[in-house]
Image (spheres, rainbow, N blue to C red):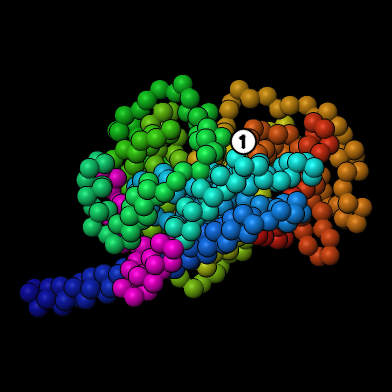
Amino acid sequence: MRKGVVPLLTLALVFSVLWGYGQYEARRRWENRAETQYQRAFIDLANNLGGLETHLSKASVSVSSRALRQTFAEIWRLAYAAQEKLGQLPIGAVELTRMKMLLAKGGTFAYQITDRPAEELYLTAEDRQILEGLRGQARYVSGQLTAMQANIVQNNLRWIDVERLAGGHLTAAVMNKRLGTNELTKSLVMVEDGLKRLPQPGLPESAVVFKPTPKATAGKRRIGTGEGARIAARFVVGPGGRSTTQYLGRLTGTMPLLLYTVTPGRGEGEPTATAHPVRVAVTERGGYVAWMLAERPATVSRRIGLDEAGRIAQRFAQARGFRNLTVVAREELGTVSIISMAPVVHGVVRYPELIKMEVGMDDGRVVGFEAVPYLTFHDPQARTPTPKISAEKARKELDPSLRVTNVRQAIILDDQHRELLCYEVDATKDNERFLIYISAEDGTEAKIRRVDRNGVEIE
């Protein structure tokens, strides 16, 4: 009997070692992929800040209204791009209020200048005072980020280590202590402290800070951690699915979240190929899933295309109560597809209520889900406004050389973050695709986006 047991134990041990090594390799590839994305986002952030400082300097010596309009348009673009890249770094727990305010004020100030009529497009003494404040701060931050880039290369610093330290989302004191040991987060905190000692631009915070109150969770009852765990598990594995759920903590803010790790089990009829942990955030008010992110091994295989990935995302969303969604953009990122969807209400596409999902192109599994914009802007009581101009009149406002392929009604956000009913005109010119938004209120051109054939915006 023992002679038969020993080979079995040996085989089991070998299998365990091989399985463990495979998991280690998969985790390492996943981390390398994430690190590459973080490094790219930081490099772009540093480049955007450098360009922002350069154009603020150009604006300080420019007197031509045409040059001012072009320069401030570029300042607005760079400030917006920098905000986006900063948001892609795993530093949500690091307090960077002043850096974010610099970018918000820079973008708002630039927009205010470019929005002036041609006869008023010049810089007043007050404008120049604001400009010098922004320029000094941008120069300081740009220099600090350039030094951080050199330090990252020289000492092989990794953003994935910051993500690990931020895992768990414990108390603020414990979180600050953990992040205080990391070279990258310490450098960012030093940049934030340095901004305190520089002159502040005169633009008031009230002119730039936009903190919307989440509409979908407003007035909803507060759920407990136990109920949140059941919601998180049901979202990941479906009704009756087996899983192990661990409560990680609570995130405060305008939309307080309860955080969990859900590890799918292996029940009858369930796939046996995966048991990777899934992080889930559930709103404390109302118990809605705000986001989900599954760990998955990196692969090189592609078994499905973007069309199938879009259908999988729609089925996943519909099974979880998100109905009447249309795919508005599809993008490949390695072997993962990013599917962006928006609700269609009475024939109107509601872009502010965007939902994004990640689908593995190797096995067709949904590995990522984000509904924060949806929960922020979705109002079940909202009524769709009636357009004051026709679609035909909107088409007459377009460049005659455009070839229009489709026109539909859509809700977008204007520059004051107010909802605006538009006609979305899908058109091409010189083999380039544009989405042009004509206000259904007065026929003015509200926004233009250049996109690829899959709806992804081209900067």
Q: Which residues are magenta?
A: 143-170
Q: Quadrant of the C terminus?
A: bottom right
Confirm whether residue 368 shows in the render: no
44 up-or-down from 324: above or below? below
Name the residue rendered at 61%, 22% in the picture. 381
Check if residue 154 falls in the magenta segment. Answer: yes
Q: From the top left corner, tell me how far across and down residue 65 is, in percent.
A: 75, 51
For disc 1, the neighbor class at 10 Å (few under 14, some 14 to 19, many from 20) is few
Q: Nearer the viewer, residue 268 or 377?
A: 377
Name the residue rendered at 22%, 50% in the picture. 177
Describe residue 297's horizontal placement relative to residue 405 as left or right: left
Q: From the top left corner, tell me how far across and down residue 412 is, in percent.
A: 68, 39
Q: Nearer the viewer, residue 329 or 253?
A: 253
Residue highlighted by disc 1: 417
Describe residue 188's horizontal placement relative to residue 455 as left or right: left
30 up-or-down from 389: above or below? below
Q: Quadrant of the N terminus?
A: bottom left
Q: Nearer the viewer, residue 82 or 120?
A: 120
Confirm whether residue 76 shows in the render: yes
Describe residue 180's horizontal placement relative to residue 213 as left or right: left
Name the residue rendered at 46%, 43% in the picture. 200
